[in-house]
Amino acid sequence: MNAACKIVLYFIAVLLIGALLAPPLYWAGTALIPMLREEQFQKFFNRAALIAAAAFLWPLAKSFRVKSVRELGIEPNSGWLRDLVIGLIAAIGLMIVLCVALDFFDGFKWHAPKDRKLGDIPKVLLSSATVSLLEEALFRGAFLGVFLRTMGKWNALFASSFLYSIVHFIKPRDVEIAAADVHWYTGFELLPAVFSQFGEPMLILAGFTTLFAVGWVLGYVTMVTRSLWMAIGLHAGWVICVQGFGKIAKLAKNKLPWIGSELVVGIAPLITVIFTGLLCWLLVRRRAAKS
C-alpha cells in the first residue's frame, strides 16, 4: 500500500474513532469541568478526533517502517524551553502588532466590558496547549517526517503544509446539539457535517492561504531546529491570540481583502504569519552563526 492510501485510511480511522469517543468525552468533560458545560458538542468531537489522531500516530509511523523519531528528523533538544518561549513570543508579539494595526484602521470593535468573556481565558490556554502539542506531533512530527523520507525537503514541506491546511476544513461547523440530545451515536450523526465547508469554495480559499503559510512556517522551523518545540510555541501563541481575541472583540465587516470574518482570513493575517516566519528564520540563523 502506498503512502497516500495509508494516510487516507489513517484519517478515515481518526474520524470513525473520534465519532465514537466524542459522546463519552462530552459527558466526562461537562461533568468534571464546569467551565466546559457551555461548549458545543462539535468542539468535543474535534478534540476526540485529535485524541484518535494521536493514538494512531505511532501505528502509522510503524507502517512506514519508522523505528524511532530520529528517522523522522527529530532530535533531542536540550534548549527546548528556549525554543518554546521564542515561538510563543514571536507569535503573540506579531499578532499584537496586527491587532494594533487593525485597531488603527477600525478593523475590529471591542466588546462592551460586560460582554468580555475573560473567564474563558483558562479554556483558551488549555486549548492552545492541547492543540499545539497534538497537531505538531501529527503534522510536523509524523507527516513531515514521513514526507522527508520519500521526497525532497521543499516538496515535503509543501505536501505537509497543503495537508495541514486542507485538514482544517474537515470538521463540523455551526452545528448546535443540545446536551439532552447527545447519545452514543451522536458523533456518527455529525460525520456528514464534517465536510460541509467544502460546499463553500470561497470560504476555503480565503482561509487556505493563511493556513498554508502557517503550515510552511511551522514545518520550516521544525526542519531547521530538528525539534518540535519552536513550532509548538508558535502554534500555541497563534491559538491563544485567535481564540482569546474572540473573547474580547469582534472583527469589523466589509474589510476584505485585508481581514475577513476570522482572524486567520485576509491579507493582513497572511502578512503577519510571513513576518513571524522571517523573524524565526533570522533568530535561528543568528544562533547557528554563533555556534
Image: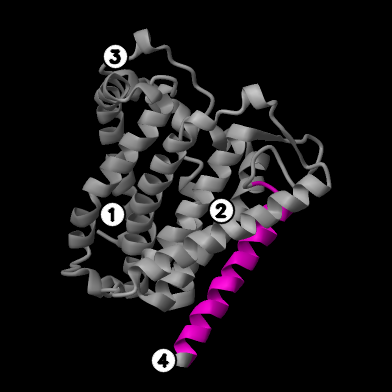
Which mark's residue is nearer the viewer, 1 or 3?
Answer: 3
Residue type for callout 2:
Leu
Q: Does label 4 or label 2 sit earlier along the sequence?
A: 2
**Residue 97 image position (x, y, % from top left):** 69, 57
Q: CA distance from mark 4 to mark 2?
A: 33 Å
**Residue appearing at x 49%, y 59% in the figure:** 88
**Marks 4 and 2 close (CB-CB < 8 Å):** no
> Regarding mark 2 in the picture, which secondary structure is present there?
helix
Magenta region: which residues? 265-289
Assess whether residue 38 is covered by the magenta stretch: no
- Is residue 228 placed above or below 170 in the rendered structure? below
Label 4 crowding class (10 Å Cα cut-off): few <14, some 14-19, many 20+?
few
Residue on which disc 4 sits: 291
- Horizontal side, residue 276 vs residue 179: left or right: right
Q: Badge 2 is on which residue?
A: 211
Residue 6, numbered circle: 1
Horizontal arrangement in the rendering, residue 28 relative to residue 245 (left or right): left
The label shown at residue 183 is: 3
Q: Secondary structure at mark 1?
A: helix
Q: Please tell me whether residue 61 is drawn above or below residue 171 in the rendered image.
A: below
